[in-house]
Image (spheres, grey):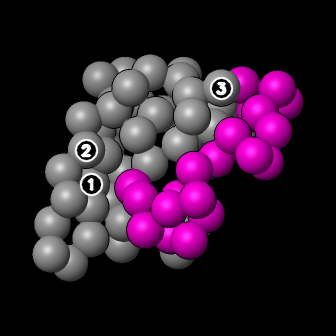
Amino acid sequence: MQEPLRFGVYTGIEAELQSPEAVPAAAQLGLEPPRFCGQCGRRMVVQVRPDGWDARCSRHGTVDSSEVGQR
């Protein structure tokens, strides 16, 4: 089972402290891949592909854009 997100995936700020204005406009439109791990807030390695993206956290593994809609 996946843990709930504790950090904003676009800002790295704790979810309780993040304001809606902190999320970039491109991310709100779905044009930007996540840059931070939602579990630990660490910066992730992101690769953008023609068919989507994948993001890897050194501690929590990989997330693929094809998996996001399934969660």
Name the residue tied to disc 2: 46
Q: Would you place residue 70 above or below residue 13 in this image?
A: below
What is the CA distance from the residue labelled 3 to the residue labelled 2? Answer: 18 Å
Expressed as whole percent of the image width and height from the top left, the position of residue 12 reads 56, 28
> What distance separates the C-alpha of mark 1 from that of mark 3?
21 Å
Decide whether the magenta segment is chiefly helix, strand or loop.
loop
Of label 1 and label 3, which has the lower sequence position?
3
Residue at the left extreme of this rendering: 50
Question: Height in image: 41 above or below 46?
Answer: above
Magenta span has 46? no
Q: Residue 49's quadrant in the figure?
A: bottom left
- 8 lies left or right of 19: left
User: Circles 2 and 1: CB distance less than 8 Å?
Assistant: yes
- Is there a contact, CB below 8 Å, between mark 3 and mark 2? no
Q: Mark 2 is on which residue type? A: Val
Helix, strand or loop at mark 1: strand
- The stretch of residues the image draws in magenta is 14-33
Which mark, residue 54? Answer: 1
**Which callout, 2 or 1, points at the residue further toward the start of the chain?**
2
